[in-house]
Image: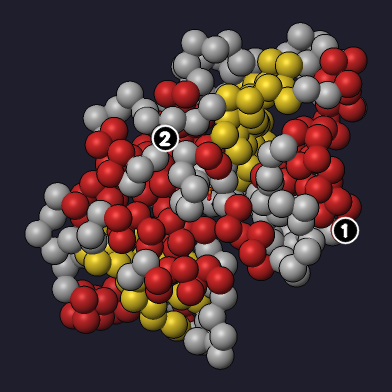
Amino acid sequence: MPQSPDEDLFLAIDCKAPQILQLRDDLFEKKDLEISMLRLDEIHPIVSGNKLFKLIYFLKEARDSVHKTIITFGGAFSNHLAATAFACGKLNLNCVGIVRGERPKTLSHTLMFCMQHGMQLEFISRSSYRQIDKDFLNELNNKYGKHVLIPEGGFSIKGKEGASLINNYMRNKNFSHVSLPVGTATTFAGIVDSNESGSEIIGFGVLKNFYDLEERFANLKVDSSKKYSFIGDYYFGGYAKKTAELISFMNWFYTKHKVPLDFVYTAKMMFGIYDLSAKNYFIPGSKILCIHTGGLQGNDSLPKGSMLF
Ligand SMILES: *Cc1c(COP(=O)(O)O)cnc(C)c1O
C-alpha cells in the first residue's frame, strides 16, 4: 500500500495496492486523449475506495488509545459507515454509528453490514441529527466513555490528510488532469492540497445546489495557492438520485471496460468524462487519470437485476 508511515494499518485491513487501468475507446483515440483509471475500488473486496484513506488517521488514533472506541455518523446507505464498521472490526476497535432517521422495520443492506461487523447502531430522528450539538456530544461521552469522534463523511483536516495519501499512487506519472467525484469534498481537498505535480485536479459534484466548495476548502485548510476545477453539471437529479440514462451508461461502461461503477459517485464522474471528451473540454494530448473511489456497496440498494454486474 502507500509508501507512508501508516502502511501497517492498510496491511492490517488486508488492502492491496491499486492498479492503473487504461480505458480504450474510439472516442478517446479520435480526440487524442489518454484516459486511465486508478482502481481504488480494488484495494479491498469489501471496503474499497476513498473511505479507508479518510479514516486512516482516526483508526490510528483509536488503535493507539486506551479506550479503542470510534463514534461516527451517517445515513442508512452510507459508504462511510460501512467502511468504518469493517475497519474497526478488523482492528478490534469498538465502534458506534449514529444513524440519521428513526430505526426502520427492515434495515438497509448497509446497516445490516455494519451490524454484522460489530458496529453498534444508534438511531436518531432527522431533526435531532440536524441539531447535533455540544450537549449531544457530551451525552456520547457519558454513554460510551472516551472515544475518537469522526465527523460525518470524515469531513475534517485529519480526513483530508488521510485522503492525500492517494497522491502516492500518481506521483511521477505526468497526468495533465486527475478527476474524482466530490461529496463532502474531503477527498478532493486531500488530493488538491498535496498535489505537487502540476496536474489539473477536477472534482465532479454529485450534489444539487453545491455552492460552498470554497468555504469547505477553507475549513479544511487547503493551500489556497493550489489550482483545481469543479464541475457541477453531472449530478443527475441530486445526491443518490439516478436516471435511466445513468443506469444504462453504467451497464454500457461495464460491458466496454469490465469496470463496475457505483451510481452515486463514480458513474456520474465517468459520464462527465465521456461527455466532456466529446465536447473537446480536454486539449489533444491530455493524459487524464480518473480516480475510481469505490462505493460499489451502494449499488445494493438498486432494484435487483438493474446491473449487469
Ligand atoms: C464518499 C464517496 C465519495 C466522496 O468523497 P468525499 O470525500 O465525501 O467528497 C466519492 N466516491 C465514493 C465512491 C464515495 O463513497
Amino acid carrying mark 2 in the image: Lys
Residue 157 visible at all: no
Q: Is residue 30 left or right of residue 211?
A: right
Task: Say if 194 sits above or below 220 in the image.
Answer: above
Q: Is residue 72 left or right of residue 38?
A: left
Farthest bottom residue in view: 105
In depth, the one of 306 and 150 nearer the eye is: 306
Q: How many marks overall?
A: 2
Dot 1, crowdedness within 10 Å: few (<14), some or many (≥20)? few
Element class at badge 1? helix
Residue at 58% from the left image edge and 24% from the top image edge: 20
Amino acid carrying mark 1 in the image: Ala
Check mark 1 vs ligand 1: CB closer than 8 Å? yes or no: no
Mark 2 or mark 1: name the one nearer the start of the chain.
2
Residue at 40% from the left image edge and 73% from the top image edge: 115
Residue 55 image point, x, y percent:
37, 49
Residue 240 image point, x, y percent:
69, 61
Residue 159 image point, x, y percent:
39, 45
Residue at 48% from the left image edge and 53% from the top image edge: 46
- The residue that mark 2 highlights is 16
Element class at badge 2? loop
Task: Say if 158 sits above or below 73 in the image.
Answer: above
Q: CA distance from mark 2 to mark 1?
A: 34 Å
Task: Say if 134 sits above or below 155 in the image.
Answer: below
Task: Say if 286 sits above or below 10 in the image.
Answer: above
Q: Quadrant of residue 174?
A: top right
Residue at 47% from the left image edge and 16% from the top image edge: 171
- Quarter of the image with the N terminus is top left
Residue 167 image point, x, y percent:
46, 26
Q: Is residue 259 left or right of residue 284?
A: left
- The residue that mark 1 highlights is 244
